[in-house]
Amino acid sequence: MPNKNWDSLDPFDKMLRQKFTFGMDSGTQLIIQKVCGFELFNTRPYHNYETWSDGYHVTDGKFKVQMEDLDDAINKLLKLRNKEIESHNYDLLRGSDFPNIKFQTTER
């Protein structure tokens, strides 16, 4: 439950609260990390130069994704949760690329 009137919330906050609902469980539902690094993102075929870039790592404890833009990362995570795409997609993080974060989860 937000501390503000629903209409006063940031649109992105509203979307997260609507898409990542909670029940009678406790724990972390979503972790968003803004990361940067050398050629981490922004490495498209037409780029022929080296560059530093930033993007996002997002996890719900089950799925982990990385994307250059936060809205794309959230949407990819939601698609994975809804089983709309294959979980071995190229932009999923390998387990060693994401910090070891402990989640408290309840099976539903």
Image (tube, rainbow, N blue to C red):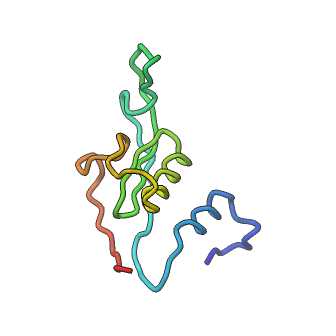
Residue drawn 45% across and 45% down? 56
Classify residue 17 by image quadrant: bottom right
Q: Quadrant of residue 108?
A: bottom left
- Residue at (45%, 42%) from the top-left corner? 67
Q: Position of residue 22 (x, y in %)?
A: 50, 77
Residue 50 in the image, given as x and y percentages of width and height: 39, 18
Q: Residue furthest top?
A: 48
Q: Quadrant of the N terminus?
A: bottom right
Q: Compared to 50, does 103 lie above or below? A: below
Residue 30 is left or right of residue 13, and the answer is left
Q: Nearer the viewer, residue 83 or 52?
A: 83
Instruction: Work out which residue is located at the far right of the displayed protein and give it.
Output: 7
Quick check: 8 left or right of 47? Answer: right
| Residue 17 in the image: above or below residue 35 | below
Residue drawn at 41 percent across, 80 percent down: 26
Up/down of 53 relative to 34, above or below: above
